[in-house]
Amino acid sequence: MELELSTGNSGTNFIKHIIEEDLKAGKNRGQVATRFPPEPNGYLHIGHAKSICLNFGLAQEYQGTCNLRFDDTNPVKEDVEYVESIQEDIQWLGFHWHELYYAADYFEKIYESAVQLIEQGQAFVCDLTPQQMREYRGTLTELGRNSPFRNRTVQENLDLFQRMRAGEFEDGSRVLRAKIDMASPNLNMRDPVLYRIRRAHHHRTLNQWCIYPMYDFAHPLSDMIERITHSICTLEFEDHRPFYDWVLQALKTPCHPQQIEFSRLNLNFTVMSKRKLLDLVQGKHVRGWDDPRMPTLQGLRRRGVSPAAIRDFCERVGVTKKESCIEMSMLETCIREDLDRTVPRAMCVLNPLKVVIENYPDGKVEELEVPNHPSQPALGTRKVPFSRVIYIEKEDFMENPPPKYFRLSPGKEVRLRSAYFIQCVGLTHDPKTGEVTELRCTYDPQTRGGANPPDGRKVKGALHWVSEAHSAIAEVRLYDRLFQVEFPGAGGTDYLSQINSHSLIVLKNSRIEPSLMAALPESRYQFERQGYYCVDRFDSHSGQLVFNRTVTLRDSWAKEKGSS
Ligand code: ATP
Ligand code: MG
């Protein structure tokens, strides 16, 4: 899919405009009733969040209602696991449905509607094979032909349909079709199928039915039964709208919901269809539906993204009829802005390098009082212990630095955040690998709290650190984009071959400051100078925390790994 990249279209919403016109005209007795209708055949992704925010958001804005309806008319791919996760995700996003329904609960009413269409001479049982059906259907440039079974009598159709339900015929041997127009320019109007025979176990109706209504038939009826006023769906259903309206008109239903289409959310560097997401899970390319690299709500949640950030993103993306692809960096911006405002700061050294401060007394410990947020005093302060042996980031030391390197190197001085200036006076190498294993430094007691010394000496680098004796080891998982290309699968390429093999880096020896040791699952922090991190909700145990990197501090993807 080669789509124009977009940075969103916040504020405007043509659907609100339609609703306001309807309210002015006194339509639907001044009611607004929407629904979110997922098929329980996978986990919700961020595209669904757009639809959820839209449907629930409209109901909130116009004091209306929004139902959650499981569109479970296709028994084969559906499962209670999905039914449960979908409910959890919607609530997590911060929305509450008015009523919870299942399309399967309408099977009897939908069946009765089909019988009514037969009685009105507007539906017939057809015995063409699927192959023949395709041939008779015609194409965009070629008219369709009437099925030879189209002129069956009402009596014969009623009898056959009743026997389809009773299980007298084999799967796929017959279907019920609407009798509309085989010459219609809209292929969806060429006598579309209403019911098929399918002996499949349904997660809700079990083995009660062996015939199932098609989505296009069940959907307008479900909307009508629930007295939905505005039935909002994505653009690919635009061509189905004539049939949606045909069903309701033919049945002379007491109300007629209005179908309105909007464009899907697409994001670059990921895939969004449930089928592809399922492939990623089943092929073990990711650790599950809730892998933090997945665009699923469970994945985003596990990664540390807050519901508020997702709602903000959906708002900024806006609602239009224009197909576009939103940049992942826009989602990341929403996440950063939300976390920057709301989460406490803490220090974690991802790849520790030991530093011994030679002139700092052995056994002495200072509890430094450090604010948890630079501009939100309400987030309080914490005590960070300082002692003779600390760790800094390996990346923050270079033995032979290039000019303008402001971090630590032999002879150079830097500031330890909230602590002291230190100067590197010596180092130890691993005799085999030549790698630097330990630094020796001195500190300046006049720089406590990171203050400038009385002689006005200044340093540019400010490093994060932890005290060896007071820190704990934690696992840190660094995530990057799941795909290395912007449009996975574009032009018929194999999206599975475009997975970014560096999308997960696991660090087993990171060191966290003591205030993080009691962090609860799902709590979020800014690790100073590193990014935003969240305690993994499933793999963390007390004393053995696992942190997921939600997002880096800056958009480093395009520019590639800048330094601070
Ligand atoms: P997928 O193609 O990912 O399987 P779907 O449309 O089949 O998605 P449904 O369970 O039928 O998934 O979707 C429930 C609702 O969410 C529908 O109203 C659908 O239009 C909407 N929706 C699904 N994907 C997106 C998306 N990417 N952007 C906006 N709305 C979406
Ligand atoms: Mg669908």
Image (cartoon, grey):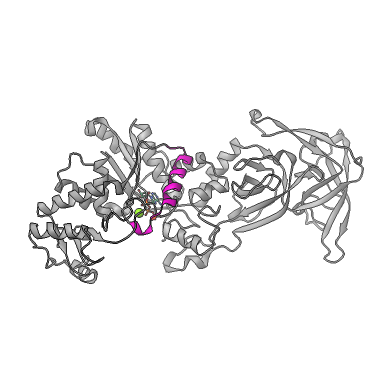
Residue 499 relative to residue 387: left or right: left
Residue 115 relative to residue 471: left or right: left
Confirm whether residue 184 shows in the render.
Answer: no
Q: Quadrant of ligand 2?
A: bottom left
- Please determine whether, in this image, residue 59 is positioned above or below residue 468: above
Residue 507 is situated, as x and y percent measured from the top left of the image, at 69, 55
Quarter of image, res 422: top right
| Residue depicted at 49% across the width and 57% down the height | 270
Magenta residues, as a range? 75-95
The N terminus lies in quadrant: bottom left
- Please determine whether, in this image, residue 382 is positioned above or below residue 498: above
Residue 551 is situated, as x and y percent measured from the top left of the image, at 59, 48
Residue 469 is situated, as x and y percent measured from the top left of the image, at 82, 44
Q: Is residue 89 magenta?
A: yes
Residue 209 is situated, as x and y percent measured from the top left of the image, at 27, 55
Residue 527 relative to residue 132: left or right: right
Q: Is residue 248 magenta?
A: no
| Residue depicted at 40% across the width and 43% down the height | 52
